Image: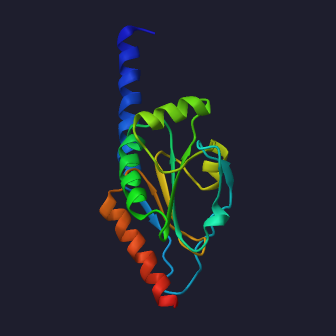
Amino acid sequence: MSVRAGKALAFSGFALVVIAALWATSSVQREDTTSGSEPRRSAPDFSLPLLSGLDFALSEHRGRAVIIDFWATWCGPCEVQMPVLDALWKRRRGEDLMVVGVSVDTDPAEVIAAWVAERGIEYPIALGDHDLAMRFGVVGFPTLLVIDPDGGIHTQHIGVLSRPELEEILDEIRSEQSAKG
């Protein structure tokens, strides 16, 4: 392969990645049931080890909203999303919200823990894998899922969400729960 052909191939690959990233950051799916027609798709239950040494089981958090963030250390947008989630976690933990990051890295736990510590992230980080991500329909990173207190998937978003966007989603869930009585 000539140098010119190699550069053209590299540029094409880069352009494809940029296009995919732009598409990914605009992909939001809300599974809304305010019309009362269909119940939300249930989030698959899972249990994973946390970097803290404890375990996280999704089913243990019924009754509160749960934000699940599928991420990886090599993902630039993931690194942008994590401080937003951390600020939300610090402000609202213990209330009606749980935040958990699910690392899909293949690196050992020590490497992931060092990466997380270096960035000062405090919300729980679980050690997951691509199989779990696939069960949730994850096709890009970061992917955030907001699970309602009943265990249904309210929102699935590929890309970065701002804190106001996350607060709006959580307010919608809170309103739905209030309406149920």
In the image shown, does 49 or 7 lie closer to the viewer?
49
> Is residue 61 shown above or below 21?
below
Relative to residue 48, is residue 72 drawn left or right?
left
In the image shown, does 99 or 6 lie closer to the viewer?
99
Residue lying furthest top: 2
Q: Is residue 38 visible in the rendered structure shown here?
A: yes
In the image shown, does 9 or 80 lie closer to the viewer?
80
Q: Position of residue 41 (x, y in %)?
A: 61, 70
The count of marks equals: 0
Give the image's coloring scheme. Answer: rainbow
> Is residue 14 shown above or below 34?
above
In the image shown, does 115 or 32 lie closer to the viewer?
115
Q: Position of residue 22 (x, y in %)?
A: 35, 46
Q: Quadrant of residue 174?
A: bottom left
Q: Quadrant of residue 40?
A: bottom right
Q: Residue shown at 55%/29% (left/top)?
A: 111
Q: Is residue 34 visible in the rendered structure shown here?
A: no
Q: Position of residue 11 (x, y in %)?
A: 35, 25
Q: Position of residue 144 (x, y in %)?
A: 48, 55
